[in-house]
Image (spheres, rainbow, N blue to C red):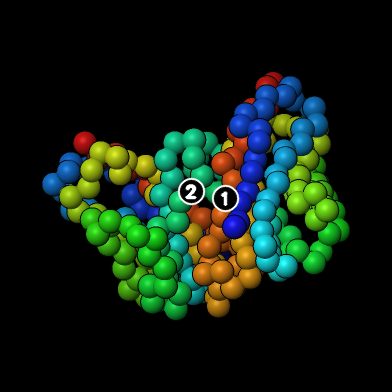
C-alpha cells in the first residue's frame, strides 16, 4: 500500500469554527509532514513529525495545532482561522530517519475555505 | 543558500511533441538530492525521480528522461511524445543531507498538452 489518504477532501469553515484535518498512511513511514499550498505556488512546509515527535514547526501560527497520535496518523487541528488560511493542505510521509534522501509520498490534500 | 529555479512558468505544446522542463539549483553542500514531482489537477503530488549529487548518470523511464549536469547545476526533465495526461504542474525540488527533512521546491512549471 503506497497511499496516503486525507479527509475530508473539501472543508468550508467559519472563522469561529474548530475543525480537524486527518491524514493516514500504512507504508510504515515514521516521518510525516503537513504542507500548505496556495494557488499557483509550491507547497510550503508547516510541520514535520519524526517518530511521532514534532521535529519542525516552521513558525506556524498557533491557530494550527498538529497532532500525531500514532505512527500511521497525523491530524491538523484548526481553530479561529482567517480567510487567508484558505488553501490546499497536503500531508506527506517518508521513511525515517530523515536525511534529505527520502522521497515524500503525498496525499491528495484537503481544500480548505475559510469564510 | 538553497534555491531552485524553474524559469518556465507555463508551457503549452501540442500532443506528441517533445518538451523539456528546466531546473537550475543552488547549494553549498556537496551531498544533496534532487527530485521531480508531478501535480495533476487532482492536487496530489506524485514523486517521479530522485537523483543524488554523486550520480550524474542520465535516466530514462518510458517517455520520461532526466539530464543532470553538475557543471551547470541543472536537472532538466524531458517528456518525449507528450500526451494529454501529462498536463500538470511539475515541481523540481532540492534537499541537502541532514538538513532537517526540508525539501526546497521550485515555483513549478505548468504544462499544457493540447490535443
Q: Going 45% across and 51% down the picture, which residue do you hit? A: A44
Give me the residue at 28% from left, 56% from top.
Answer: A61
Specify the label residue A43 is tagged with: 2
Left or right, B12 with reference to B55: left
Q: Distance of mark 1 from mark 2, alpha carbons?
A: 7 Å
The residue drawn where x is 18% and y is 50% is A80
Residue A63 in sight from this viewpoint:
yes
Q: Position of residue A86 (x, y in %)?
A: 32, 41
Q: Quadrant of residue B90?
A: top right
Along the viewing direction, whichever of B43 and A42 lies nearer the viewer: A42
Q: Residues within 10 Å of mark 2 (few under 14, many from 20)?
A: many
| Residue A71 in sight in this render | no
Image position, residue B20 (x, y; %): 76, 36
* Relative height, residue B80 to residue A48 (above, below): above
Secondary structure under tag 2 reads loop
Would you name the residue on which mark 1 appears? Answer: B105
To the question of a shared chain for discs 1 and 2, the answer is no
Residue found 83% across the figure and 59% down from its top: B56
| Residue A94 place in picture, x, y as percent | 54, 67
Which quadrant of the rendered structure holds the N terminus of chain A?
bottom right
Amino acid at each position: 500500500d503506497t497511499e496516503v489518504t486525507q479527509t475530508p477532501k473539501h472543508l468550508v469553515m467559519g472563522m469561529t469554527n474548530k475543525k480537524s484535518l486527518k491524514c493516514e498512511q500504512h507504508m510504515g513511514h515514521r516521518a510525516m509532514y503537513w504542507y500548505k499550498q496556495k494557488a499557483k505556488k509550491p507547497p510550503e512546509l508547516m510541520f514535520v513529525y519524526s517518530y511521532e515527535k514534532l521535529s519542525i514547526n516552521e513558525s506556524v501560527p498557533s491557530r494550527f495545532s498538529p497532532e500525531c497520535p500514532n505512527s500511521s496518523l497525523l491530524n491538523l487541528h484548526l481553530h479561529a482561522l482567517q480567510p487567508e488560511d484558505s488553501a490546499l493542505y497536503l500531508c506527506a510521509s517518508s521513511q525515517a530517519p530523515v536525511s534529505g534522501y527520502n522521497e515524500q509520498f503525498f496525499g491528495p490534500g484537503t481544500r480548505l475555505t475559510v469564510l | 543558500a538553497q534555491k531552485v529555479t524553474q524559469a518556465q512558468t507555463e508551457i503549452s505544446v501540442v500532443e506528441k511533441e517533445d518538451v523539456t522542463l528546466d531546473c537550475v539549483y543552488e547549494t553549498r553542500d556537496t551531498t544533496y538530492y534532487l527530485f521531480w514531482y508531478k501535480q495533476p489537477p487532482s492536487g496530489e503530488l506524485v514523486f517521479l525521480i530522485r537523483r543524488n549529487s554523486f550520480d550524474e548518470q542520465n535516466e530514462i523511464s518510458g517517455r520520461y528522461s532526466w539530464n543532470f549536469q553538475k557543471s551547470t547545476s541543472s536537472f532538466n526533465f524531458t517528456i518525449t511524445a507528450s500526451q494529454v495526461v501529462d498536463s500538470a504542474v511539475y515541481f523540481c525540488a532540492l534537499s541537502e543531507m541532514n538538513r532537517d527533512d526540508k525539501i526546497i521546491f521550485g515555483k513549478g512549471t505548468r504544462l499544457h498538452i493540447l490535443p
